[in-house]
Image (tube, helix red, strand yellow):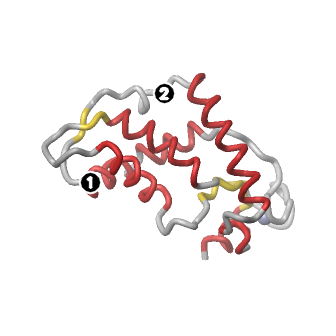
């Protein structure tokens, strides 16, 4: 499964290309309370990332990347076949902790100092954009488990 982590592999490039255009289109259509949130956060980068990662960013990823696939990218299996319980989203684990790392990249771009407030929605919009460097794969629960270990 190493090819899933190789930016030069066909599948990595193909998925990322599709994802980039998906992000652009979806931004123009979506109304989402997390993205529109004008509430501000302030403090150290890591503390902000940790705060947003608890629930908010996870919910947003699920809502934003709402594409549905019926077959696993790796084994081509479908739900109900070969003990496949469900198909799941899997962030490319080229990053060690993808959701947190992408949040940190977004915060890095906006952060001024630990007393300047940042809009929560602004961080989350940039966090979604940062997914242009990190493909999300659609895998069955069995392949997902193997991939993450
Ligand atoms: Zn599979």
Q: Which residue is mark 2?
A: 32
- Residue 90, by quadrant, is bottom right
> Residue 126: image x %, image y %?
44, 40
Of the two numbered discs 2 and 1 on the same chain, state the one appearing first in sequence. Answer: 2
* Mark closer to the observer (2, 1): 1
> Residue 24: image x %, image y %?
61, 32
Residue at (31% x, 42% y) in the render: 110
Q: Where's the N terminus, which quadrant? A: bottom right
Near-viewer residue (15 or 143): 15
Q: Which quadrant of the frame does ligand 1 lie within?
A: bottom right
Residue at (81% x, 48% y) in the render: 70
> Residue 139: image x %, image y %?
72, 59
Residue that extends furthest to the bottom in the rendered view of this protein: 149
Q: Where's the C terminus, which quadrant? A: bottom right
Residue at (56% x, 29% y) in the render: 27
**Judging from the image, what secondary structure is the residue with disc 1 in?**
helix
- Left or right: 42 in relation to 17: left
Q: Which residue is mark 1?
A: 45
Q: Residues within 10 Å of mark 1 (few under 14, many from 20)?
A: many
């Amino acid at each position: 499964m190493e090819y899933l982590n190789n930016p030069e592999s066909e599948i990595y490039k193909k998925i990322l290309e599709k994802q980039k255009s998906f992000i652009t289109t979806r931004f123009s259509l979506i109304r989402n309370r997390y993205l529109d949130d004008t509430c501000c956060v302030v403090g150290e980068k890591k503390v902000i990332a940790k705060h947003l990662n608890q629930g908010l960013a996870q919910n947003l990823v699920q809502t934003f990347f709402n594409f549905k696939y019926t077959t696993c990218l790796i084994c081509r299996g479908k739900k109900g076949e070969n003990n496949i319980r469900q198909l799941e989203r899997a962030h490319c684990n080229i990053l060690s902790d993808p959701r947190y790392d992408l949040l940190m990249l977004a915060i890095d771009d906006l952060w001024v100092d630990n007393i300047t407030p940042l809009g929560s929605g602004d961080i989350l919009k940039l966090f979604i954009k940062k997914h242009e460097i990190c493909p999300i794969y659609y895998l069955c629960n069995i392949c997902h488990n193997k991939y993450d270990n």
